Image (spheres, helix red, strand yellow):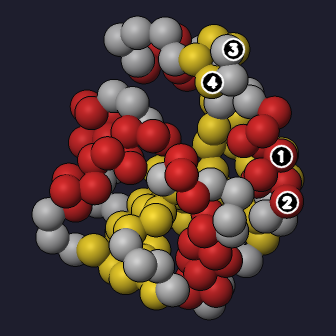
Amino acid sequence: MKILEISKNKKQYMELLFLADEQEDMIDKYINRGTMYILEDNGVKAECVVTDEGNGILEIKNIATNPKFQGMGYGKSLIDFVANKYKNKFSILQVGTGDSPATIGFYIKCGFSHSHIIKNFFTDNYNHPIYEEGVKLVDMIYLRRVL
């Protein structure tokens, strides 16, 4: 297994990016200002895009694992890689996600805790309803991990 930084042609990984963010114009808001990593293990298994949000905060804007390989530790490996790589440059690693028990549970297992909520984020910023685990997403739930 190896993790590589991708600096060119990031959109070649759109299939994975769409797993975590299904609207291209939303991805366009962070993909070029963010740093992208892919995890390879006999092929690309997962990706992650992080951005500097200022004030010592690094944000995971997009993280996704190919559905065939979910539950195998690839997402956690990417989070641990990012946390270790940036621990001397940032003090907080944060992520915003929908109010989905499985997703929030994953982040809690990765050392994150609840931070804050942005009301109506999904209904205000997406041109169609977003559903996860059969639930319509409305608010963005932010979680943080101290680096």
Between discs 4 and 2, the one toward the N terminus: 2
User: Callout 2: few (<14), some (14-19), or many (20+) C-alpha neighbours within 10 Å?
Assistant: few
* Image location of residue 58, percent across then percent down: 55, 65
Q: Is residue 118 visible?
A: no
Q: In the rendered structure, are the residues bearing label 3 and label 4 in contact, judged by CB atoms less than 8 Å apart? A: yes
Q: CA distance from mark 1 to mark 3?
A: 16 Å
Residue at left 20%, top 53%?
11
* Image location of residue 130, percent across then percent down: 52, 17
* Three-letter amino acid code of the residue under disc 4: Glu
* Three-letter amino acid code of the residue under disc 3: Val
Q: Which residue is mark 4?
A: 132
Q: Which residue is mark 1?
A: 105
User: Callout 3: few (<14), some (14-19), or many (20+) C-alpha neighbours within 10 Å?
Assistant: few
Q: Which mark is residue 109?
A: 2
Q: CA distance from mark 1 to mark 2?
A: 6 Å
Between discs 1 and 3, the one toward the N terminus: 1
Q: In the rendered structure, are the residues bearing label 4 and label 2 in contact, judged by CB atoms less than 8 Å apart? A: no
Q: CA distance from mark 2 to mark 3?
A: 22 Å
